[in-house]
Image (spheres, grey):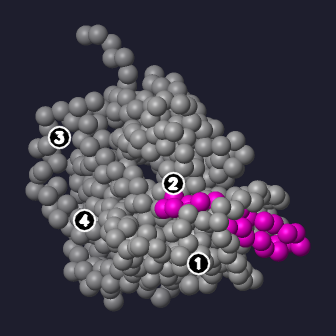
Amino acid sequence: MPEQKYLTTPPEQDTMPAGVPYIVGNEAAERFSFYGMKAILAVFMTGHLLNAAGEPDLMSTELATKWIHNFVAAVYFIPILGAILADWLFGKYGTILALSIVYCLGHGVLALMDVHTGLDQRTLLMWGLVLIAIGSGGIKPCVTAHVGDQFGKKNSHLFPVVMAWFYFSINFGSMFSTLLTPWLRKEYGPSVAFGVPGVLMVLATIVFWMGRNVFVHVPPARQNFFRETFSSDGLRAMRNLIPLFLFAAMFWALFDQTASRWVLQAKAMNRSLFGFYLSADQLQAVNPLMVLAFIPLFSYFLYPFLGRFFRVTPLRKIGIGMFVVLPSFLIPGWLESQLVYDQAFLPENAQNESYTEESQLSDQSIRMAIQEWDRSSTITRIDVDRRRESPLYTVFSVDSERFRSVNGTLNDLARHFQEKKISGAVRVNVEEVEAPSIGWQILAYAFLTAAELLISITCYEFSYTQAPNNMKSYVMGLYLLFGVALGNKFTALVNDFLDSRREAGHPVLEGPDYYWFFTACMAVTAILYVFWSRTYRGKTYVQSEKYDETYEAEAADAEINA
């Protein structure tokens, strides 16, 4: 019998598996690449996008939000396909390696957007995001399961330690990249900012490939996969868990807007904090930083404290989290009502005019020349003292043609502007306003991160225990599909509707109303969840010395009291 090239079962050892460092290193680099790229999408789409002729082709707030959430929805829809490929045909290692190469190609397309290829950047952006969605989404359910495959009975006590480092690597990579890539975008441009995450993804793939000889390669189930998945236990688990995932979808509809709406709102805020100036897209680093701080706080203090008053079950944690998330959108809604934009008006009979605005900012006289107006024109308020930029919204209408900002960006102090007049002039009144501090958005991040720990992590843990042993990866894929992907698709559809209404000249849910709408949706979801959770009766499956042994969950572990 020929000798097997790779291990197919964990060796009998009580030490750390040799393949773990390669997996953790791969995960840190992969998460850096994904979150670094994602961090700058909103600003790139609304402030840097060009067409094939090199002219601005910027997206509106609604369109950029729709694109981002369609992308995230795809990233979390594809895991179910990746899980099937891994468990049915190619195994986890083969699936991860092949799709990582696709992942790298996607980053390469984004990094080459500044190269003159004859294609507009919007087309290249679309294809780059498609490839990244296939790569990132396809490997997502395989990586965690691949970690578990490395452990046997004797060293299973080390699995929680590795998972702690695994989760730490995810958030460390996310935090570091969301601080670095916005700075790279500002200092060196989008090409470098997209290229560095691509280099990290190539590094992640190489590190993973280097561990091939020490990994445990569990073979795919082949023809047994579908029979095991659609057994009576499997169907019962899916009937129990899919409603939970649908409730979690609304949380993800709110949570992932930190990469879209929250970034665009931060551009109009005072981002000076404790002597530091933060770019709008760097604010996303607050979430992983808070996750790292909150995990021990919740595990060692909050949960034991709450345990003095009631039993802290998984479903109770999720229910509490659904109410905790509400302030995280009430605060941005209030902030939106406080953001006052300078208004500029053109004469009623204005036609193809240019005008000059002169403002007194930071004890310096700055003259802004805004040339011929049309649908693509941009007016931007420049506040030198507080170093922020924000768009002017609708400033006039002629024959139903609306003049809107396209979110131009100007970070550095521009002291001189060319003055140009074609005909006519207009006087612009600029009000002295104080923009809200970015500290308010950081407070909203605190509520959102607390809700993430209560809902997201608990959903992973609870779903794992409620899934039969032979379909745990598949159930994780279902959670990503019905929870994260569906939530982001809901946000994308809402913004698609808002964009169409705006284009038709009948905008709805503008300003704070947008945030009130999502807050109301979350509140209704939380109330319905309380009633549903009281009816939940599940079955817990645990790994034991006999692989297929299970036991019934206690009723208290599967219920939540109102």
Residue 58, numbered label: 2
Contact, mark 4 vs mark 3 (Cβ under 8 Å): no
Quadrant the C terminus occupies? bottom left
Contact, mark 2 vs mark 4 (Cβ under 8 Å): no
**Residue 100 figure quarter:** top left
Dot 4 alpha-carbon crowd within 10 angstroms: few under 14, some 14 to 19, many 20 or more = many
Which amino acid, by three-letter code, is at mark 3? Answer: Phe
Which one is in front in this view, the residue at disc 2 or the one at disc 4?
A: 2
Q: What element carries label 2?
A: loop
Identify which residue is drawn at 57% across, 36% down: 114
Residue 541, numbered label: none
Q: Is residue 82 visible?
A: yes
Q: Is mark 4 on a helix, strand or loop?
A: helix
Q: What element carries label 1?
A: loop
Q: How far apart are marks 2 and 1 (CA)?
A: 27 Å
Q: Mark 3 points at which residue?
A: 225
Q: Give the range drawn in magenta.
A: 355-377
Dot 2 alpha-carbon crowd within 10 angstroms: few under 14, some 14 to 19, many 20 or more = many
Which amino acid, by three-letter code, is at mark 1? Answer: Pro
Q: How far apart are marks 1 and 4 (CA)?
A: 60 Å
Identify which residue is drawn at 13% across, 34% down: 223
